[in-house]
Image: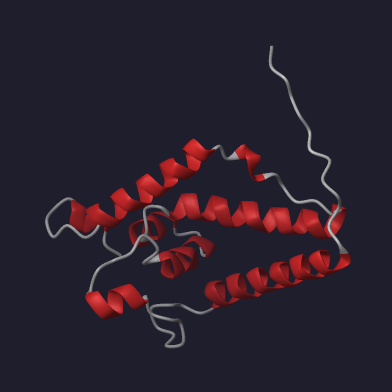
Amino acid sequence: MVKIEFQNIAPASTVERIAAGVGISTITAGAAVVAYFNPTTAGFFPVCPLYSLTGIYCPGCGLTRGFHALFHGDVIPALHYNALLPVFAFLFAFVFISLILVVARGRGLSWRVFPPSAMYGFLILAAAFFVLRNLPFYPFTLLAP
């Protein structure tokens, strides 16, 4: 028999709701900047420190350019910049919706929807992506941003 337990979590305090509102504003402003300015031509976007120091692409390299392309409806170029973009977009959307719910009802989305195996799976996927996108031969060179 499956026993379902619900936690009695107290609603967020006023400070937590204000912090969530600030988070929503920050994410919205950041998305607007990425959508408006082209990261390939605008000079104020930060460069990946790992890539600038070592020449190695991290799993997040290309996300800013990918989100810019995605905001403009260019799905294939967005995936070319970073093949993990759908996973990151889902995670960002989950956090954004959770922050909205903290402000609106005092409770965000439960992280219990992600079992530990899913989190470990994402880490393994990101590590494999990290290694594969840095291999210097075809077809792995297609993963580089």
Q: Residue 13: where, in percent of width, then height?
A: 86, 62
Q: Nearer the viewer, residue 36 or 55?
A: 55
Please tell me whether residue 17 is drawn above or below residue 41 in the rendered image: above
Q: Nearer the viewer, residue 83 or 77?
A: 83
Q: Residue furthest bottom?
A: 43
Q: Residue 87: where, in percent of width, then height?
A: 48, 49
Quadrant of the image occupied by residue 56: bottom left
Could you tell me which residue is drawn at 83 percent across and 57 percent down?
Answer: 12
Name the side, left or right, on which 99 lies relative to 123: right
Could you tell me which residue is drawn at 20 percent across and 53 percent down?
Answer: 140
Name the side, left or right, on which 142 lies relative to 35: left
Quadrant of the image occupied by residue 112: top right
Could you tell me which residue is drawn at 79 percent across and 56 percent down?
Answer: 102
Name the side, left or right, on which 102 lies relative to 75: right
Could you tell me which residue is drawn at 55 percent across and 50 percent down?
Answer: 90
Q: Residue furthest left?
A: 137
Q: Nearer the viewer, residue 22 or 80?
A: 22
